[in-house]
Each structure stands twice: as structure tokens, then as C-alpha cells.
Image (tube, rainbow, N blue to C red):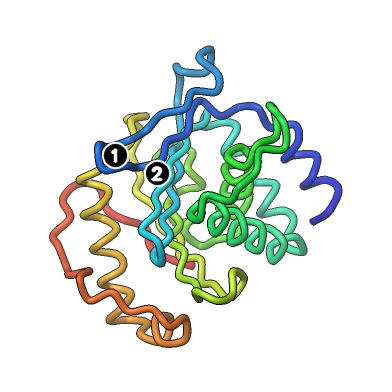
């Protein structure tokens, strides 16, 4: 990863909160109470192999600036994707290590996801999140190789600044994964994963923006 992107990682302190989903719902960690108001973009990660789900919220303008950096640095895309894949695997396996109080894995992951958003067609189709919304990444990966992975982005555009309830998020993820099984069976065959319990479910509400 280039020095500019490293600086972005180290300097980013704009995350409001992060959450991991448990059987009881969202488990919350708040980073900066001063940033709990104003327009937001909400990020979600889902690791299919482990069913690990993570969410982070950050000010919309911070997300827009970071995603623009990603858009303007296409030569960094593979490094950003590799960083996301590594952190997801570590976090899902409970092996992520906090480096210090300002540069922990959650801030790194949120920053990398924001940078990655700017490299996707999803970002353009969501009007570059100028109106806010939710940015999702599903991680399809091989159990034996962290970097043998397919990051699958999609978006839901709204300006409500509220994280999706766990049940609604689960319905959306099931719908997307089910659609992917039909449209891209090679993603599942090559990565040696098959989850037949993901069945098509109706998803109501704002339209999803799909694109790699």
C-alpha cells in the first residue's frame, strides 16, 4: 500500500461507532460521541464462511472524501482489497490485533472499505453516496487461503442515518447471496463453499444497487 493510503489509515479518526452482530443483536463500540449527529454512511461486512457480520458508521463527508481517494488511486486497488480480505479473516477468526488506541483494526477496516467503495461501480450507481446510505461488502473466500477471495459490493441508498435492524440485514444478505448463487455459481465452486440454507427472500424498501 502506498504512503498516501497509509497516511489516510493513520489519520482517520472519524468513525462514530462499530458493531459486531451477536445472537442478541448489535454489540456496540462507540469511538467518538461528538460525531453522533449529522449525515452518515453506514458500512457492513459479511464473511460468508463464518457468518461474521460487522458494521461501522461514519460521517458522510468523511466517507465521500475517502472513497474519492480510492477512485483517484486505481493503482492501490489490489492492496486495498487485500487489506480488507486479511482484516475480515482476522476479525472473523478473532485474531485481529489492536495496534494502538488510534489505529485499531476496526478503524483500518472502515477506512479500507471507504477507499474500496470508490473503486466500484456500486459507488457510481449510488450517486457516490452524496445522499447517504448503506455500503455492503460480502466476502466469498476459500477456507485455506485468505487472499483467495471475491469481494461483492452492493448498496442501499437512503438518508435515514440509521443502521439496519439485524433481521432486515439478514434478509438482505440472504437475498443477495441467493441471487449470486444463481448468477455466479463459479464464485462458490472455486471457493469451495456451498450454503444451501440461503434461500431467496423478498426484500422490501429502497432499491439495492448491484455492481462490482
Figure check: 211 above or below 36: below
x and y, in percent, of residue 153 in the image? 46, 60
Q: Mark 2 to mark 1: distance in Å? A: 9 Å
Which quadrant would residue 137 be assigned to in this image?
Answer: bottom left
Residue drawn where x is 14% and y is 62% of the image: 201
x and y, in percent, of residue 176 in the image? 30, 65
Residue drawn where x is 57% and y is 38% of the image: 63
What is the secondary structure assignment of the residue under circle 1? loop
Residue drawn where x is 79% and y is 56% of the image: 1
What is the secondary structure assignment of the residue under circle 2? strand
Q: Evaluate if marks 2 and 1 touch, with contact meaning CB atoms under 8 Å apart.
A: yes
Of labels 2 and 1, the one closer to you: 1
Q: Which mark is residue 164?
A: 1
Q: Which mark is residue 134?
A: 2
**Between residues 178 and 127, which one lies in front from this camera angle?**
178
**Between residues 129 and 9, which one lies in front from this camera angle?**
9
Q: Residues within 10 Å of mark 2 (few under 14, many from 20)?
A: many
Q: Residue furthest top?
A: 34
Figure check: 82 above or below 40: below
* Left-right relation of 203 to 90: left
* Left-right relation of 50 to 147: left
Amino acid at each position: 500500500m502506498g504512503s498516501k493510503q497509509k497516511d489516510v489509515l493513520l489519520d482517520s479518526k472519524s468513525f462514530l461507532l462499530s458493531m459486531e452482530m451477536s445472537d442478541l443483536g448489535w454489540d456496540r463500540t462507540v469511538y467518538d460521541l461528538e460525531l453522533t449527529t449529522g449525515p452518515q454512511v453506514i458500512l457492513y461486512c459479511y464473511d460468508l464462511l463464518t457468518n461474521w457480520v460487522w458494521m461501522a458508521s461514519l460521517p458522510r463527508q468523511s466517507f465521500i472524501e475517502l472513497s474519492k481517494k480510492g477512485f483517484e488511486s486505481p493503482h492501490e486497488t489490489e492492496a486495498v482489497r487485500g487489506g480488507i480480505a486479511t482484516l475480515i479473516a482476522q476479525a472473523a477468526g478473532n485474531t485481529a490485533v489492536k495496534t494502538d488506541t488510534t489505529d485499531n483494526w476496526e478503524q483500518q477496516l472502515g477506512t479500507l472499505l471507504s477507499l474500496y467503495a470508490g473503486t466500484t461501480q456500486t459507488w457510481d450507481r449510488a450517486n457516490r453516496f452524496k445522499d447517504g446510505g448503506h455500503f455492503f461488502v460480502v466476502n466469498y473466500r476459500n477456507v485455506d487461503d485468505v487472499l483467495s477471495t471475491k469481494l461483492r459490493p452492493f448498496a442501499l441508498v437512503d438518508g435515514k442515518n440509521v443502521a439496519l435492524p439485524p433481521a432486515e440485514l439478514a434478509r438482505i444478505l440472504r437475498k443477495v447471496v441467493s441471487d449470486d448463487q444463481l448468477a455466479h455459481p463459479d464464485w462458490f465452486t472455486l471457493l469451495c463453499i456451498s450454503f444451501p440454507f440461503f434461500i431467496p427472500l423478498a426484500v422490501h424498501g429502497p432499491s439495492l444497487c448491484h455492481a462490482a
